[in-house]
Each structure stands twice: as C-alpha cells, then as structure tokens.
Amino acid sequence: MEKIVYQLDAGGLLLGTTVADESPLEPGVFLIPAGCVEIAPPAVAEGLRPRWTGEAWAVEVIPAVEPVLPTDEDLIAAARRRRDILLKRCDFTQLPDAPGDTAAWAVYRQALRDITAQPGFPAAIDWPVPPA
C-alpha cells in the first residue's frame, strides 16, 4: 500500500508529489520521505503558489522576475568567443597548399579580427560572410 505525499523545497515551496510506502514492519504506518508533508496543498490561481509554513499551507503571489540583461563585458566576451571559433574553422585556408582563394579568406579573417572596431560594438555586430 502507498500514500501520496507532497514534496517541498528548503523554503517550503511545493515541488510536486511523491509516494510514501507502508512500513514493512508496521502495517498502516507510512514512511514519509524527508521534506514531505501529508496535507494536500490548496488549489491556487494563476500567479499564486502554495508554501508550507511548518503548520499549514499559505498562498502567496509569485514575485515578478526582472530580466537580467547582459553587460557590455558579457557581450564582448561572447563576440570574441564566436570570432575565435570562426577564425579556427578557417585556419586551414591560410596554408600554402589550401584549396580556394586564400586572399579572399585572408580578407574575411581580417574582417573577423576587426569586429571590435565596428560602430555599435558590442551591442550590434555586422558579422562578415565567409567566401564561397
């Protein structure tokens, strides 16, 4: 026999349901997992959530989450990572026996290195297109 119990996080917020098994040594006694309660949470409307207070369920408003915008340093680091990957992908084009137009690839590679000088960098980057 099993019993549905309600799992909580460290702050008392409902995580979901789980099963409490019946004790094999004491029939009728259920082994409640740590961090669980037997009392069902109330139904809540959109924008609300249940929280266990230690004695009963309370309903609270879900706080609004402010978006975290990347800083200029984050944008610069991301642009440099992308640029470095693009440069590594075409390193072979600069070898003496490389197929294709090595001069066009050299221009492309220089354009990648020059993205930091573009107006609007790092918020707006006009990424160069590799040669065909």
Image (cartoon, helix red, strand yellow):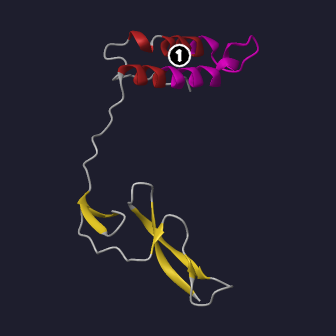
In the displayed structure, 42 sits above or below 85; it is below
Q: Is residue 103 magenta?
A: yes
Q: Position of residue 113 (x, y in %)?
A: 51, 12
State left or right for residue 50 relative to residue 27: left
Q: Main secondary structure of the magenta part?
A: helix
Determine crowd level at label 1: few under 14, some 14-19, many 20+ residues with C-alpha closer than 10 A.
some
Give left or right: position of 64 versus 115.
Answer: left
Q: Quick one: which residue is furthest to the right in this view?
A: 97
Residue 59 found in image quarter: bottom left
Q: x and y percent of residue 10 in the render?
A: 45, 55
Q: Which quarter of the image is occupied by the N terminus? A: bottom right
Horizontal relation, residue 29 to residue 77: left or right = right
Q: Quadrant of residue 62?
A: bottom left
Residue 65 vertical placement versus 119 (above, below): below
Residue at left offset 63%, top offset 83%: 23
- What is the tally of numbered marks visible in this picture? 1
- Residue at 44% across / 77% down in the picture? 38
Q: Observer-nearest residue: 115 or 12?
A: 12
> Which is more toward the observer, 72 or 130?
72
For residue 66, above or below residue 103: below
User: Which amino acid is tagged 1?
Assistant: Tyr
Where 106 sits versus 54, above or below? above
Q: Residue at x 44, y 23 (%)?
A: 127
Instruction: Look at the image and say whether residue 38 sits in the magenta stretch.
Output: no
Percent position of residue 43, x then y = 28, 75
Q: Which residues are the magenta region? A: 80-104
**Quadrant housing the C terminus:** top right
The residue identified by callout 1 is: 108
Q: Secondary structure at mark 1?
A: helix
Query: Residue at left 57%, top 90%?
Result: 28
